[in-house]
Amino acid sequence: METIEPFYFNRLAYVQSKVSNDVLKELKNEAKFILENQSQFLKYNNELAGNLEKEYSTDRSKEILEKDLITLANEYHKHSKENKHYPNWKIKDLWINFQKKYEHNPIHDHTGELSFVLWITIPYDLNEELSLPNCKNSNAPLNSLFEFIFTDFLGRITSNKINVDKSYEGTIIMFPSALKHVVYPFYTSDDYRISISGNLVFAPPKSIISYQ
């Protein structure tokens, strides 16, 4: 028998990073300002699948995050190894979510090429959420989690759960816009879970930079 070679059918799911403390502070201040001046901001609910009362478009957050989002999109593209050139990216849309206790985002996907979620404020303790009677004896405890839903190369439905807790404040993930995901409700806090989400698309090329 000749040399045996393994072949994998894997694809990059998402990349994860942290914004700086300064950026996170700016975003927290912007979130506070939006809550105190809601009438000044465009409600974005009609564009979104979320079963949330308060979702707003925010241009200021787009300005704060633009550099980090482009950097992260380039890193995603680099690690995905889809081709040999960096594309140019443009932020298609961006919004802020103020999720209350019991609210949720049902399974959905986004438009664009890449999408992201950045957690600004997490008001609950994850262990307390997962210890509640509704899920502590379940074989699939999901209170407060973020979950990707997808099929493997055999066509079986599978998932990847992200245990979002207080340590995730300032964490950002970027993933293909077509990747299905769901945000489960939390139950133990009366404060908001605040996150920023959005989509990126390819922009007309300015120049093409090769990388190995």
Image (spheres, rainbow, N blue to C red):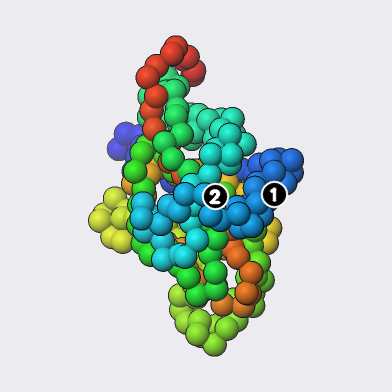
| Residue 8 marker | none
Give the secondary structure at mark 1: helix
The image shows a total of numbered marks equal to 2
Identity of the amino acid at label 2? Gln
User: In this orientation, which residue lies closer to the viewer: 181 or 111?
Assistant: 111
Q: Residue at x 64, y 69 (%)?
A: 191
User: In this orientation, which residue lies closer to the viewer: 134 or 205?
Assistant: 205
- Image height of 212 relative to 132, above or below: above
Q: Quadrant of residue 164?
A: bottom right
Q: Position of residue 46 (x, y in %)?
A: 36, 55
Tell me if 190 is positioned left or right of 54 in this view: right
Q: Which residue is mark 2?
A: 40
Do we see residue 166 in this rendering? yes
Estimate the spatial distance between the alpha carbons at disc 1 and disc 2, rounded to whole Å. 16 Å
Q: Residue furthest left?
A: 155
Q: Which residue is mark 1?
A: 29
Q: Residue furthest front?
A: 39
Q: Position of residue 189 (x, y in %)?
A: 63, 74
Q: Position of residue 196 (x, y in %)?
A: 54, 50
Q: Residue at x 39, y 32 (%)?
A: 201
The N terminus: image quadrant: top left
Q: Quadrant of residue 150?
A: bottom left
